[in-house]
Image (tube, coloured by chain):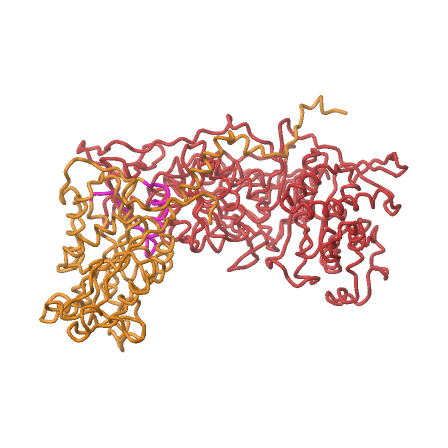
Chain colours: A red, B orange
Amino acid sequence: MSTDAAVGPAGREVRQTHRVVIRFAGDSGDGMQLTGDRFTSEAAAFGNDLATLPNFPAEIRAPAGTLPGVSSFQLHFADYDILTPGDRPDVLVAMNPAALKANLKDLPHGGILILNTDEFTKRNLAKVGYESNPLEDDSLEPYTTHQVAMATLTRGALEPTGMSKKDAERAKNMFALGLLSWMYHRGTEGTEQFLREKFAKKPDLAEANILAFRAGWNYGETTESFAVTYEVAPARLAEGTYRQITGNLALAYGVVAASQQSKLPVFLGTYPITPASDVLHELSKHKGMGVTTFQAEDEIAGIGAALGASFGGALGVTSTSGPGVALKSETIGLAVALELPLLILDVQRGGPSTGLPTKTEQADLLQAMYGRNGEAPVPIIAPQSPADCFDAALDAVRMALTYRTPVFLLSDGAIANGSEPWRIPDVATLPDLSVTFATEANAPDGSGEFWPYLRDADTLARPWAIPGTAGLEHRIGGLEKADGRGTISYDPDNHDRMVRLRQAKIDGIEVPDLTVDDPTGDAEVLVLGWGSSYGPIGAACRRVRAAGMSVAQAHLRHLNPLPRNVGDVLRSYRRVIVPEMNLGQLAMLLRAKFLVDAHSYTKVAGLPFQAEELAGVLTDAVKGDLPA
Amino acid sequence: MTATDLPTPGVGGLDLVPTTDAPQKAKDYTSDQEVRWCPGCGDYAVLASVRSFLPELSLKRENIVFVSGIGCSSRFPYYLDTYGMHSIHGRAPTIATGLAVTRPDLSVWVVTGDGDALSIGGNHLIHALRRNMNITILLFNNRIYGLTKGQYSPTSETGKVTKSTPMGSIDAPFNPVSLALGAEATFVGRALDSDRKGLTEVLRQAAAHRGASLVEIFQDCPIFNDGSFDVLRKGDDVAERLIKLVDGEPITFGNDGEYGVVRSATGGLEVAKVADVGQDAVVVHRAGEEDPTQSFALSRLSDQDLTHTVTGIFRKVDRPTYDDGARAQVAAATEQAQQRGDDLQALLSGRDTWAVLPEPENEQ
């Protein structure tokens, strides 16, 4: 924290700081995600730039007080444009010994530690293997520790409500939120309004939570244990109107926008799966915008119904994560053969198999690229941040509709649940995605027949003739089709031609050139990433440059087809580093396609890269020391 | 309960599909593709029945879609001059679901086989039935895998010797009608491929039914399971084997109605000589009965040995369809949204926004 000090009206020191990272950690049932979300909303409303990292177990409620049950929410907010949720917290709020034990290693010495002392009982300490009570020994000496009996104080504040002790204690997360809101000079009206609406049907609960929130605030104000409060000024982002948005919400909005811009009704066929389910939840709220959502019996039925809807002239969409993609693969192959538009949203998580459902990974790239039988090319686009999911969805739909093809959008757990400010676009500026259905016979021989596989000369797309169009009755399917006429064909030359045509169609998709950020123009090292690692890579580049070294950064949004200039870009740098949350999938593609010596830096820990570690890798690379 | 009232069926399965006054013939439904089933295949008879039945519906041909999975019968759509999709193994009901929900103006048919519908696609079949999608499913049951050259199927008799079961199959077979009734199907019928009159009647009522209709068609595979239904086609005892259901009529069969279906001591149904039990003891068929118990018992009248094979319409009841419900929700929400004046810009903006002003004004 770089800070400027001043003295506040209450005689207490007020420090101006540019950025803060807060981590709320507690039991799965403690409401840490809600607490973090709420603080995020306040930071957003105040005008800070921000980035968040929710981190929770796959179990809905692991046994209380245990390490597997720890849930946390990290929030980075600043007065300038930031790129990541932060490597390490400046402030750690730990609601119980398990949360302390699981998170303390990330808190730098000198960091602020706020502990809910009520949970530090012998039993709870023993549960997580503390031999002595850290509140009493010297293990917390390196930190600025605040011991607060949050449960007791919350109970006391709620006494007049006549609530049971147990129920009253459940509001202790709002006490913590109140205290942190006070520490960082955040308003109270927004949270109080939020609680009233959230518990509109249970006004008693709303009032209880508000009481707890105010108690936390007042505790900071009236006790002397907190000598310093902090102010983080609004960020100077580009002019515009902003809101806070998560990646899954932006994806859903992107799909709704694509529907409006294409004038096609959306049909989402899907099956619940972490971390993609929120896309279904959100889209199911927007039936009023012409969105139909179908929760199918399984992943296969979800995509099958979406493809059926596309055949009928709707915008077919399916949402899933890696294990679901595995099940959908055969239908994606069918969509490749049928040459119909289809959007496949893959919110990646840790694999293989069930893997790490709630954690992030980028290991579905090769599955999206090659995970089908036969030569079955599919375009792939990957958003680089939560807000970018909106634009990526629109671009994916553009490709699907223009080229009549299934398209993969690879998001991941980090950006799906993470949030950041989003400059709300003016819908008048959104791209026109309107399509033209075939209405006339098209046979070049003038026979008056309809040839479903006669291609557009520019895009190689075939006509989209939907049922209900008189005179264009035709049959399509998974069997190989005769070029043009579209009847079943087992002719060897025809198959060779069709395989190459399908490939050429995808290879010919228009995608923008790769841009390189090389401020000094003399960098020898290029770092090339894709997807959600944009933030940490960008933050690492800033650090390396701040240290006086040159590094060039480029980020791939289109992974298939790759931008036309990728080979030239790669070859114009002496050393190329490709950080990925997999074992080097993009690097392998680049090496195979361009015969360049791209070096992988990989991590598959279920968490995003840290800027600090990548800065180290890049610094080494600048000095000539490449990752092994 | 749902937030919006579900439309009650009451209407026919084809009521939203545009019709034509132009007379149609079977030839109009014949595509230019050469039919490539084996000589003697039962699929020919079914194709002929369907081609000659479709004109009767007077639908616009372009508003009919046949979707199939994989297997011999799944080549069906290629031979009909309607819209069609030959999809992937077992998944035809899923494709049909997306079409049925988004396009109420289409008559959507699924053509599938015993392996396609009951083995690899079993899950989709039961869910399409329970959701009561407005689709008509033709299940061609030849009790064998034909396209993969003769392995036993989920409807093959236990003990059947095939290429994959040289010592005899140890699988217990599915009874497709029982399965469909158990999956909450609202329309279940069965016909024999060679019985054009009976098949056409079942098709007619299936098409008119709003909701999922399952039609099991017994069908011969002359190459790998030849003559499997011959006992129902020829021989002296055909009349004693084949029970043709007529709604509202006592269930009798055999020469001069010699036999009747009566209640058994165990609560099911059994066959008795009418002369022994009296006409009043014979059960009257009620396809529209909400309680599926009697229809289910009819489906269990005899085992896979075809001793007493029931054909006709087992069940035909009204229940809201998924696709009508889905469209009703979208329509209701759209109306509300229009009344509120919701638009995309408002959606994207949400409620909690903040403005960043141009640089100079932002200076403090």
Task: Return the residue nearer the eye: A523 or B105.
Answer: B105
Q: Measuring from the top left, give residue A377's x and y in whole percent.
A: 40, 46
Relative to B358, does residue B54 appear above or below in the rendering? Answer: below
Task: Return the residue nearer the eye: A361 or A501.
Answer: A361
Place residue B263 in its image quadrant. bottom left
Q: Is residue B163 visible?
A: no
Which residue is outermost to the bottom?
Answer: B167
Q: Is residue A1 left or right of residue B260?
A: right
Instruction: Please give the range of residues in magenta.
Output: B81-104
Q: Is residue B247 left or right of residue A34?
A: left
Q: Quadrant of the C terminus of chain B?
A: top right
Relative to A447, does residue A600 appear above or below in the rendering? Answer: below
**Residue lying at 34% horizontally and 58% vertically, measured from the top left:** B121
Which residue is outermost to the top?
Answer: B360
Q: Is residue A83 left or right of residue B86?
A: right
Which residue is outermost to the left?
Answer: B236
Q: Measuring from the top left, give residue B48's x and y in whole percent.
A: 15, 51
Q: Is residue A553 visible?
A: yes
For the image, the number of numbered tags is: 0
Place residue A547 in its image quadrant. top right
Q: Is residue B269 left or right of residue B328?
A: left
Q: Measuring from the top left, give residue A440's x and y in whole percent.
A: 25, 31
**Residue lying at 21% horizontally and 65% vertically, measured from the top left:** B310
Relative to A477, does residue A166 appear above or below in the rendering? Answer: below
Q: Find out whether residue B6 is within the magenta segment.
A: no
Place residue A544 in its image quadrant. top right
Task: Return the residue nearer the eye: B78 or B16.
Answer: B16
Q: Measuring from the top left, give residue A555's x and y in whole percent.
A: 56, 40
